[in-house]
Every structure is written in C-alpha cells, then in structure tokens.
Amino acid sequence: MGVSRRALIIGRGQPFHNGHLRLIQRALDECDEVDFGLGSTQLNGVVRHPFTSEQRIDMLWKIFKKDMQRMRIHPLQDINSLDDTDDWVRYVLGKLEKQKRPEPTDYYTGSMVDAKWYFNAFAGPGDEVIENGDETIYVRGDKRLHIVDRTMSGFPPAEELRSLIERRDDDWKRFVPTEIHDLVEEGYPAHLRVALRGTAFPENPPEGLAFVREDMVPPTRYEFRRDRWNKVRVENASRFR
C-alpha cells in the first residue's frame, strides 16, 4: 500500500484568482487531501489585504465546493519570522497538529522564493529532482516539494489584479473564477478604490465610498461615512485615491 499523499498550500487569496485555482487543483489531482493555510488573517481593509478572512473562506467554498470534503482551511497569522529560521514552518505544522491533522507529505507553491521556507521540512535543492512540464518536484523519502512555476501560467500577480479592481477596470474578471465575481465586486472595500466622479452624489453608496463633485470649483472630494457625505479636508486628501 502506498503512502497517503497529503498536500499543504499556503496563500493569502487577496483575491483568489485562476493562478490559485491552478495550484490547488494540481494538489487535489495528485494528493488524497489538501490542507490550505490562509495567510495574514489578522489584516483586512487595508492596501494589499482588502478582504477579511471570512470573505476569503467564502471564496474558496464557492470555487471548490465539490472538493471541500477533501480540503481543510486553516487561518494563519503573520509571526514576523526570520529568513534563516524554521519558525514559520514550525508554526504552520503546529497549527495542523493542534487540529489533529496528519502531517503533510507534499508542499505546493508557485515559486522558489516561497519554497525556501519549506526545504527542511519537505525537500529541496540537493534532493532527487523530477521535472514534469511546468512542475519541478523535489523528493526526499516520502516527502515532496512541488514548484508549479507561476511565471508559466500567464496570469498576472495579485497586486495587478487589485490595481484593476481599485481602478474599476473589469479586466480583472478575466483572471478570477466566475463563481466569485460577485464576492470580489461587493466585498472590495470602497475606501481602497479610485474615487467616482460626477455632478451628483450616487444613490445608496457603500460605507467608505470616495466621490469627487466635479460641479464644484475646485472639484471637491467627499467620502461616505456614517450615513452621510463628508467633505475631505485638503490636508487629508492624500489618504484617498
């Protein structure tokens, strides 16, 4: 009887896009179970971390609902670990152990930069190497480390997608699973998006929406807070895009 393969993947999913889907699906195809570590769950509503952990978990359920019986999601917080230690991987594996999850046999990532954190716990340069198209697999005993090269995927990095969303450019939808378009559109914090412009305030605005009244001289920036439009002081204007 062969070893039961159990995959570990770590990601922030801000938002989840087709690159994440490709990596997770690869792990589901090659392993029996997948543990997904959801990173930076202590942050939301700020640049680089717009969505809450609950919103991101909802995204995963929408995309992988037929596979969730083989997936487990583990919220993780940043611990400011140093590059030359195994503190981060010990933290992650400790989380799995507390949840009584079997030790993972395979780690999946999209780049060598991320993979370095997991060389000691799984495998890495110096071990057996298997090349499989866009996937490089390092093997050490029963442990494997998979690098599914994200540069070969054709998908833009997450920061470019967030920039498109913030600029209200619907091109982001080409790279994000259709199942979560509504979650991304409705959940992206209004205060992180480029201000709308016009001569009349929008109806039913979301909290934090920035709006520039172009019929005023000079054009004046407002933000919707606590059920009212508030003029943004000049000294605070740099906080808004």
Image (cartoon, helix red, strand yellow):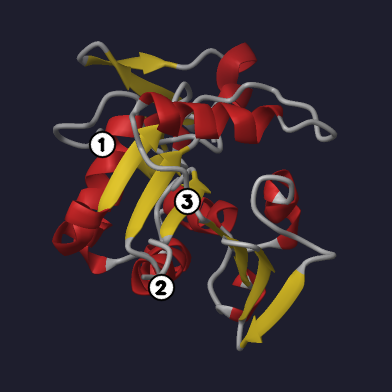
Query: Which residue is rendered at x = 43% and y = 53% of the image?
Result: 165
Viewer-nearest of labels 1 and 3?
3
Contact between labelled residues 2 and 3, with CB atoms less than 8 Å apart: no
Q: Position of residue 176 (x, y in %)?
A: 36, 65
Left or right position of 216 against 85? left
What is the C-alpha distance between the residues marked 2 and 1? Answer: 55 Å
What is the C-alpha distance between the residues marked 1 and 3? Answer: 50 Å
What is the C-alpha distance between the residues marked 3 and 2? Answer: 12 Å
Contact between labelled residues 1 and 2, with CB atoms less than 8 Å apart: no
Instruction: Please state which amino acid type lies under the numbered disc 3.
Output: Leu
Q: Which residue is mark 1?
A: 200
Query: Which residue is rendered at x = 30% and y = 66% of the image?
Result: 177
Check disc 2: other Cα within 10 Å, few if <14, some if 14-19, many if 20+: some
Asked if residue 218 shows in the view, the reply is no
Q: Which residue is mark 2?
A: 30
Q: Which residue is mark 3?
A: 8
Q: Earlier in the sequence, mark 1 or mark 3?
A: 3
Q: Earlier in the sequence, mark 3 or mark 2?
A: 3
Label 2: which secondary element: helix
Contact between labelled residues 3 and 1, with CB atoms less than 8 Å apart: no
